[in-house]
Image (cartoon, helix red, strand yellow):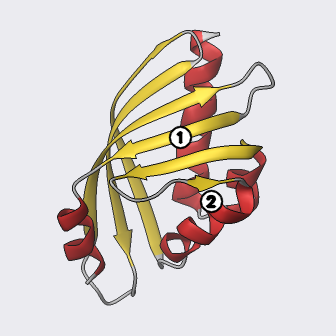
Amino acid sequence: MTNQAIAIVRDFIAAWNRKDRDAIIKLMHQDIICHGIPLDPAKGIAATMALLDGFLAAEEIDWSLEHIAAQGSVVLTERVDRFRFNKDADWTAVRAMGVFEIGADGLIHAWRDYFDKEELLRALS
């Protein structure tokens, strides 16, 4: 399951970089728990996408995968998530450590990102 779980997370990151909302949703379980720590968790695809659609509004997205490791169905990532919200604007970046729990169905059941909230707020301002 380890190699399959890593492949699913790589596909998820690639979908973000393409800004492919449908592909992102297809990789999530309907009851996903998405927790951007230190924020409150979102439960289910609708709540998760309500939380994330603002990021998909960026003109360009580039999630750089620095490291990836897995044990069984749990995948750990170290990333730099970059966004350009206006084609004439500079890139903004947020460093994140992600934990993805992949179910036997090949879908992401839980996604936790650990990041600095102040860094996120600066990137979005």
Q: Is residue 107 left or right of residue 93?
A: right
Q: Amino acid at mark 2?
A: Thr
Q: Position of residue 85 (x, y in %)?
A: 40, 81
Which sits earlier in the primary sequence, circle 1 or circle 2?
2
Element type where label 1 sits in the image: strand
Label 1 Cα crowd, 10 Å radius (few <14 / some 14-19 / many 20+): many
Query: What residue sits 30% from the left and 78% below the top?
Result: 124
Residue 52, picture quadrant:
bottom right
Element type where label 2 sits in the image: helix
Q: Would you name the residue on which mark 1 appears?
A: 111
Query: What residue sits 25% from the left and 73% below the top?
Result: 121
Residue 65, picture quadrant:
top left
Query: Looking at this rendering, what residue extends furthest in the front direction?
Result: 40
What number is the disc on residue 28? none
Q: Amino acid at mark 1?
A: Trp
Q: Is residue 77 left or right of residue 94?
A: right
Q: Position of residue 46 (x, y in %)?
A: 73, 64
Circles 1 and 2: CB atoms closer than 8 Å: yes
Residue 87, relative to residue 80: is it above or below?
below
The span from disc 1 to disc 2 (Cα, nearest Å) is 10 Å
Q: Relative to the observer, which residue lies in front, 31 or 14?
A: 31
Q: Position of residue 56 (x, y in %)?
A: 55, 71
Query: What residue sits 51% from the left and 76% below the top?
Result: 54
Q: Relative to the observer, which residue lies in front, 82 or 55?
A: 55
Label 2 Cα crowd, 10 Å radius (few <14 / some 14-19 / many 20+): many
Q: Would you name the residue on which mark 2 appears?
A: 48
Q: Is residue 110 left or right of residue 112?
A: right
Residue 97, relative to residue 106: is it above or below?
below
Q: Is residue 108 left or right of residue 98?
A: right
